[in-house]
Each structure stands twice: as C-alpha cells, then as structure tokens.
Image (cartoon, rainbow, N blue to C red):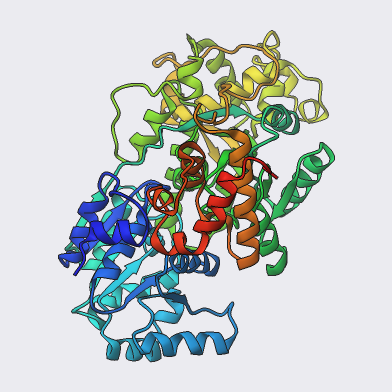
C-alpha cells in the first residue's frame, strides 16, 4: 500500500505536505475524530482527500453548496481520482448513474448536501456500503455559536450513531473558541481532537476607512488596480447592481452577483470571474463560500460585514496563491444601525441576538482600532501576536492618539439633555449649531450645548461617535430606532470621572488606505510566457467546462514559466503536475513552453 506522501506526490503532483497537513492526515488514518481549523488557502481539501485514497471503504464529503461540490469533483477527476457529487442541480439520470458506480466501488469520494445525506433512505443505503470516512466541510455551519449556522447541519450530529465504525473529520476556516468546542461536542460527542493551524494570512494587507464618499473612495482605490481581479461586497441587491453599473461606465469589467439573479446568470458570472483576468465581482454575501480563484488581489467592502467571522471569511478569498493582496473596508454609522436592526429582526432567540450583538461590537472595535489591526483580528479568534504586523493601515500610518474627553463631554451632554432619544445626525447638528427645522421645532437651539462644537467639522464628530461606540462609552438603542444613549462608562465620562482617548482627527482628501503594489512577478518569470500559458489554460478549461484552476493553478503555471521544462519528465517535476494531468496536458503545455518562434 502506498504512503500518504506517495499519494500526495503520485496523484496530486506535490513533493511534500505543507506544515501541519501531515499530522491531520495521520489523525484521520489513525481514526481520531478531528476538527481542523485552517485559514483559507492552507490546503484543507488535501488533508482528507489523501486519506480517502488510502482507506479501504468510500468517503462521504458533506458540503453546503452544489457549486463547491462540482468544483471539488472536477479537481479530483483532473487528477485521475474517481469522485462524484449527487445533488438537485444535476439531471436525475446522471445522479442515478453515479450512485450505481459508487455502489459498485468505482467512485472513491461522494459529495452530498446534509439534507440529502441525512434522509432515512440515504442513511440505510450507506450503512450497507460501510463508508470508511465522513468529512464535514464548512463545519461552523453546525454551531449556533457560529456566524453561519444552518439548521440542516445540526442533523449531522447523528452521524456517529448511524456509523459508529466510520472515521469522522470536520474542517472550517472560521471558528472562535466557543464555536470550535460546540462543533466538537455535536459531531464527536465531546471527544476527538481540535487542531488549530492559525488564522493569520500575512500576505493580506488590512485597512479600514470611514465611508465618506463611497463611490469616489472605491474608484480611487481601483484606479491602480485595473489589471487584476477582485471582489467588492455590498449590503443589498440594489447597491450591487448600481455599483456594477457605475464600474462598467468607468471602463471596468464588473459583474453583479446576488440571490435575485437567475441561477443560470449567477453561474455564468461566476465562471467568467473564475476563468478570465481583470474581472470585478460585485456581490452580496450570496457569493463566496467555496470560491477558490487563487489570484484575487483585493476584497473591498463598501458596507460593514455582519460579524468578525463573516469579515474573515470574505477577505480570505483574496491572495490564496500566497501573493500580496489587499482588504479594504469602508463603513459608516448607518451600517452599524442597520446591522443591529437585522439582528433584532432575526427570530425570537434572545441568546442568539445577544451573541450577534457582541460579534458586531467586536467588529466595530476592530474598525476603530488604534493598534495593529492584525493583532486585533487574531486576538478575536484567540490567537495572540506580540509583534505588530507592519502590513495594515495602522502599522503603515500609525494614528496619533489625543485626549478627546472635553469634546466627548459636549457630545454626551447633548445626548443626555435631549432625553437619549435621538440619532447621531441630530445630536451632531445640535453640537455644531445647525439651523434645522427639527432643532427649531424641539427648541434644541436653546440648549447649553447648542453650537459648542461649531469649530469642528462634521466628520470629526462622526468619528468621535464611532470611537465612543467602539470604546463602550455610547450605545445604539435599536428599539429606539438608532438613538444614542450613554452607558455606565459614558456617564462616568460626563461626570468627569473617566477620560476618552481617540485617534487625532486629520482633515484630508479621500484616500484608499495604504498603498501596496499588487503582486510582482519573480524576476525569473517571463510575463509574456506566463500570459500565453494562462491563455492555453483558459482555452482547455473552456473545452472541458471546468474552472481554469482545475487545469492548473497559477502557482503551477508560474513555476512552469520559471523552470521552462524541456521534456515530459522535467514537466512532471513541477509542483501540481501529477501523472493524470501530465498525461492529459503535458504535450500541449510543452509545445507552448518551447514555441519561441511563434509565441501566439
């Protein structure tokens, strides 16, 4: 029987495991129930695909999305591994044919949704086939503590009763300590091992900016990034459509993606984004899970994400090839109010609401951080980092902290004197002495605090409100339609018993966060040759109807362009070129690599 390392080399074309992968493979082969928390792009799939090929029985992979299943199956088949996905997006005849092949032992890995797997009929059929391994992908979906809870995933807690002899493994990129423990309890009955391989993505540059003129900020950010692909996340379907239209008018190739589009159009837009260069996907959160395009160079949030977990997942789609990538978030106070309203309207479970409010509090604190942003992000997931990262807006352009207690007291006095019943815009108007009908009608122009802050611009006061919300001196009263209210700490500030320290306000032109060059090619990689290899890959992928990376990922093409192999034997030494891909694509890629006379 071959070893795990031999399977990795001879099937998938990699000379060795990345750090941590081999231990997870050994755990699964040894029968230890294992939950693996690994950052996106760290190679989770290989951790269960390799043992699946070494075990005697079949492997069942539970996945939440049909598109994700299909891409995984296409990737396995490209490496010569017999795999299939049975789901409602395929015609019945194809599902039946693949099930019969699976029953006959001809298919090694079968991908199923949790709904299809946990039916009595499927459970009974699988019990007769004695699967060797069950893999739960996107395992955070099973936990109510998690940010992406899905009720259908809870049924998976019965797997160990239905299949006591089968191995069980679970994988996720996003789970805090409470979520990890809940996953292990539900899937493994509290036993098993939790392996956490870090949340840091050092190649991602992190930045957050207050949203002032969102469209201008977006266009300013994109102007030096016309030749790379990225994702822009919007909160609503309407803003997704409008943003894509604005970008198209500005000369970008931008495609909308949201749940209101037909499945056919969503699939078409996704395939274009996956296969072609310099495409911007403007999307709601309907787009993302399972997206494995390696060369996404940036993720731009035009609105506040739902939570730290959602933010981490969404920015994790950038830079999966290990090259430099950027994550910029624009946010405003209206985002926080809207997010809190979403939480309040989400069912009757008060514990769930409290958890979601705390998650949002953590995200707002991240937005208003005055220390290394990566330290704040990793700390949320229980990972302490002593040194600043040097690759976030705060490290690259550190804010100067100042005592803003006096200004905070002005703000809080206006809030208290108006009964803590008004939102940010009205309170700031009072402090700045604005002449509005609302102020005149309520007599707020006679308050002692009216106009006391006229010497400061509106953006200063907006920033101060955000930082006091993040610092816990103020809170938003959701039931009071977003009214600002003082917390116990805010009362102490107003009484002169506590201070408020904030970043110094600097009036400046709208910017786009820290400037970093997009990924530069290594000196030994010829850009023209790499472009020809990518075009060949695109053509082959189109012929086979699969995403381009299924043929070869970018990292493999870059190594080809650097090494310029002259024979099939030399090409077979390139990382990611396994025997099946060498047989399928070797000759045609060698021809393109060596065709210097006719580079077209």
- What residue lies at 39% left-to-right and 15% top-to-bottom? 497
Q: Position of residue 125 (x, y in %)?
A: 35, 91
- What residue lies at 26% left-to-right and 44% top-to-bottom? 19
Q: Quadrant of the C terminus?
A: top right
Tell me: residue 440, above or below residue 279: above
Q: Is residue 162 left or right of residue 315?
A: left
Q: Nearer the viewer, residue 26 or 488?
A: 26
Q: Position of residue 366 (x, y in %)?
A: 46, 32
Tell me: residue 237, above or below residue 163: above
Total marks shown come to: 0
- What residue lies at 63% left-to-right and 36% top-to-bottom? 528
Q: Nearer the viewer, residue 86 or 330?
A: 86
Q: Nearer the viewer, residue 4 or 424?
A: 4
Q: Quadrant of the N terminus?
A: bottom left
Q: Position of residue 406 (x, y in %)?
A: 53, 10
Residue 350 shows in the view: yes
Query: Farthest residue toward the front?
Result: 597
- What residue lies at 53% left-to-right and 54% top-to-bottom? 549
Tell me: residue 28, above or below residue 458: below
Tell me: residue 446, above or below residue 365: above
């Amino acid at each position: 029987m071959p070893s795990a390392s031999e399977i990795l080399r001879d099937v998938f074309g990699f000379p060795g495991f990345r750090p941590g992968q081999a231990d997870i493979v050994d755990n699964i082969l040894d029968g230890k129930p294992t939950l693996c928390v690994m950052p996106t792009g760290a190679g989770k799939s290989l951790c269960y695909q390799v043992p699946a090929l070494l075990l005697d029985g079949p492997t069942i992979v539970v996945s939440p999305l049909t598109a994700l299943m299909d891409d995984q199956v296409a990737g396995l088949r490209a490496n010569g591994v017999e795999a299939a996905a049975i789901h409602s997006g395929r015609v019945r005849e194809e599902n039946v044919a693949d099930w019969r092949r699976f029953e006959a032992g001809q298919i090694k890995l079968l991908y199923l949704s949790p709904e299809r797997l946990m039916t009595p009929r499927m459970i009974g059929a699988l019990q007769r086939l004695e699967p060797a391994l069950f893999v739960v992908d996107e395992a955070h979906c099973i936990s109510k503590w998690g940010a992406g809870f899905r009720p259908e995933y809870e049924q998976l807690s019965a797997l160990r009763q239905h299949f006591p002899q089968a191995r069980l493994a679970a994988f996720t990129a996003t789970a805090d300590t409470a979520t990890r423990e809940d996953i292990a309890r539900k899937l493994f009955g509290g036993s098993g091992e939790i392996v956490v391989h870090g949340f840091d993505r050092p190649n991602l540059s992190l930045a957050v900016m207050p949203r002032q003129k969102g469209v201008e900020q977006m266009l300013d950010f994109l102007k030096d990034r016309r030749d790379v692909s990225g994702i822009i996340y919007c909160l609503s379907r309407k803003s997704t459509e409008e943003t894509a239209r604005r970008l198209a008018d500005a000369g970008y190739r931008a495609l909308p993606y949201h749940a209101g589009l037909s499945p056919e159009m969503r699939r078409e837009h996704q395939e274009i984004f996956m296969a072609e260069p310099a495409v911007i996907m403007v999307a709601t959160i309907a787009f993302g899970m399972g997206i494995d395009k390696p060369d996404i160079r940036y993720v731009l949030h035009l609105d506040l994400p739902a939570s730290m977990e959602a933010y981490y997942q969404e920015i994790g789609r950038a830079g999966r090839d290990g090259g430099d990538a950027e994550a910029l978030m624009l946010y405003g106070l209206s985002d926080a109010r809207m997010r809190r309203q979403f939480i309040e309207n989400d069912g009757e479970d008060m514990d769930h609401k409290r958890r979601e409010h705390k998650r949002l509090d953590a995200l707002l604190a991240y937005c208003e951080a005055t220390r290394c942003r990566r330290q704040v992000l990793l700390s949320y997931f229980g990972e302490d980092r002593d040194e600043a990262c040097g690759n976030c807006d705060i490290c690259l352009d550190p804010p100067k902290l100042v005592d803003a207690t006096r200004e905070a007291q002005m703000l809080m006095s206006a809030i208290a004197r108006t009964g803590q019943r008004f939102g940010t815009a009205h309170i700031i108007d009072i402090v700045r002495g604005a002449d509005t009908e609302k102020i005149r009608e309520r007599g707020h122009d006679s308050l002692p605090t009216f106009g006391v802050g006229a010497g400061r611009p509106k953006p200063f006061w907006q920033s101060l409100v955000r930082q006091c919300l993040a610092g816990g001196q103020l809170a938003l009263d959701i039931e009071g339609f977003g009214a600002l209210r003082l917390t116990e700490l805010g009362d102490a500030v107003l009484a002169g018993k506590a201070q408020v320290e904030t970043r110094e306000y600097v009036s400046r032109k709208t910017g786009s966060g820290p400037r970093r060059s997009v990924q530069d090619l290594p000196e030994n990689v010829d850009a023209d040759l790499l472009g020809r290899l990518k075009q060949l890959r695109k053509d082959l992928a189109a012929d086979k109807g699969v995403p381009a990376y299924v043929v070869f990922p970018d990292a493999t093409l870059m190594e080809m362009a650097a090494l310029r192999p002259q024979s099939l034997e030399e090409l077979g030494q390139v990382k990611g070129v396994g025997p099946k891909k060498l047989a399928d694509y070797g000759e045609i890629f060698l021809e393109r690599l060596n065709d210097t006379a006719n580079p077209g």
